[in-house]
Each structure stands twice: as structure tokens, then as C-alpha cells.
Image (cartoon, grey):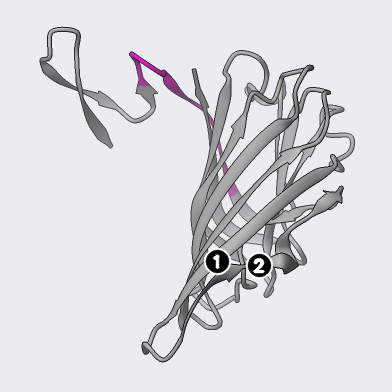
Amino acid sequence: MSIVKLNNRGVRSATTFGSISGLGEMRFIKKQTASSSATISFVDGTSDVVLDNTYKEYLFTFKNIHPSAQAAFSFNGSIDSGSNYNVAKTTTAFNAAHKEDDSGTNLGYESTYDLAQGTGFQILDQENLATDNDNGLAGTLHLFNPSSTTFVKHFISRCPHNASSGIWCNDTHVAGYFNTTSAIDAVQFKMASGNIDAGDICLYGIN
């Protein structure tokens, strides 16, 4: 994907999505492809993963996430290089939905999916993904300044997905913070049950 930008003389030029320079630089770090994977983990310093003070913001992108069994897509963080994924989080979630035949809509706060100092995995989609080929999830997760040892670590996520045998379009928004002053040095993704049957997760660093 190419992006058009202005240089310091106001002249337009193109650059690639994987390396955007200028005000706020964005760099591709790592891509992992699921294949009946129980978990997908990004651990700082492992397998070319960078998740430290190199960048103030990290972006994960999800593409064609598909489950092996009907389940929700979720994530958690670690402060011990992936030995444990159990960081306390406080979060909030809301969802917009529209039925394929236009017979139903929804927009509302989803208290079922929020956490109050919970250490479990945070669900990122409002409705469990089914295994039909017309079910799946895409989206993004932003993690801010995970290496800070002074402040909590905020994150925001947006995941459009189709569920219930593909008849509903859902748009789930989640925000929250890891309530720790220890550095978050690993992030793990998994389905609430079963495996991630297929899909790509990419990690980028943003200055």
C-alpha cells in the first residue's frame, strides 16, 4: 500500500506503508500467521520482536482471523517476558451491530466484556466468531508506551467482525489500561476456546 505525503516544500511524494518517515515514523516489526495455533505471542527480544522503549506506541493489525471452534478473540499482556499473561486491567467496551437482512440493529455499552482489575484475557469481539467461512475478524490494537516504569499502559482496539453464521456485522470497540508500572514486554493473542485456525497478526512500531 502506498501513502501520499507532503515534504517540507509542500511537494507530494509516495512511501510504503511498512516504512513511513517524517512526523511520527511507523515501522513494520513482525508478522505471524496462524495455522491451528493455540496462541500467538509477541515477546520482546524473541524472534526479531521489538516491544520496548524503541517506540512510544505499538500497533497490532489483525487480518482474516478465523477460529477452529466458535469462540471469542482475546489478548493479554505480560511483565515477565511471557512467563505469565495475567496483568491486571480495567477496560470498557461498546459495540455497533447491523443484521444482514436489515431486520435488527444494536448500539450499546457491553458490560459483559469489560474488566475491573481483572487479570484474565480481554475479549476483543462482542459476539463469538463461528467457524463458517463467512465468519471472521479484522482490526487493530494500539498499545501506548508499554516500556514505561512510571505510568499505567493504555490501549485501544477496534475489531469489525461478522458472526452468527455471517448474518450480523459487528464493530466492537475496547479501551483500557494495564494497571502496572512494570514494563509490558510481551503480548499474547488467543481464542477463548479452541485454536486460531487462520489469520495474520502484524506488529508495527510508531514514534
Q: Magenta region: which residues?
A: 20-33
| Residues at discs 2 and 1 in contact (Cβ within 8 Å) | yes
User: Which quadrant would residue 54 be assigned to in this image?
Assistant: top right
Disc 2 residue type (three-letter): Glu
Give coordinates of residue 116: x percent, y percent.
Answer: 82, 52
Q: Quadrant of residue 184?
A: top right
Q: Is residue 130 above or below residue 201?
A: below
Q: Nearer the viewer, residue 132 or 80?
A: 80
Please tell me how crowded label 1 is: few (under 14), some (14-19), or many (20+) other residues with Cα within 10 Å: many
In the visual, does 46 lie left or right of 3?
Answer: right
Counting from the top left corner in percent of width and height, residue 43 is at: 73, 29
Looking at this view, is 48 or 107 the one in front?
Answer: 107
Compared with residue 142, is residue 129 higher up or lower down, i.e. above or below? below
Q: Which of the two labelled residues, at mark 2 and mark 1, occupies the earlier sequence position?
A: 1
Is 156 inside the magenta-drawn segment? no
Q: Which mark is residue 8?
A: none
Residue farthest to the top? Answer: 9
Question: For this rendering, which residue is in front, 105 or 54?
Answer: 105
Q: Residue at x 41, y 18 (%)?
A: 25
Query: Residue at point 53% right, 83% down?
Result: 165
**In the picture provided, is 204 more to the left or to the right than 143?**
left
The residue that label 2 is drawn on is 110
The amino acid type of the residue labelled 1 equals Asn
Question: At 60% across and 71% down in the image, what residue appears?
Answer: 129
Report which residue position mark 1 lands on: 95
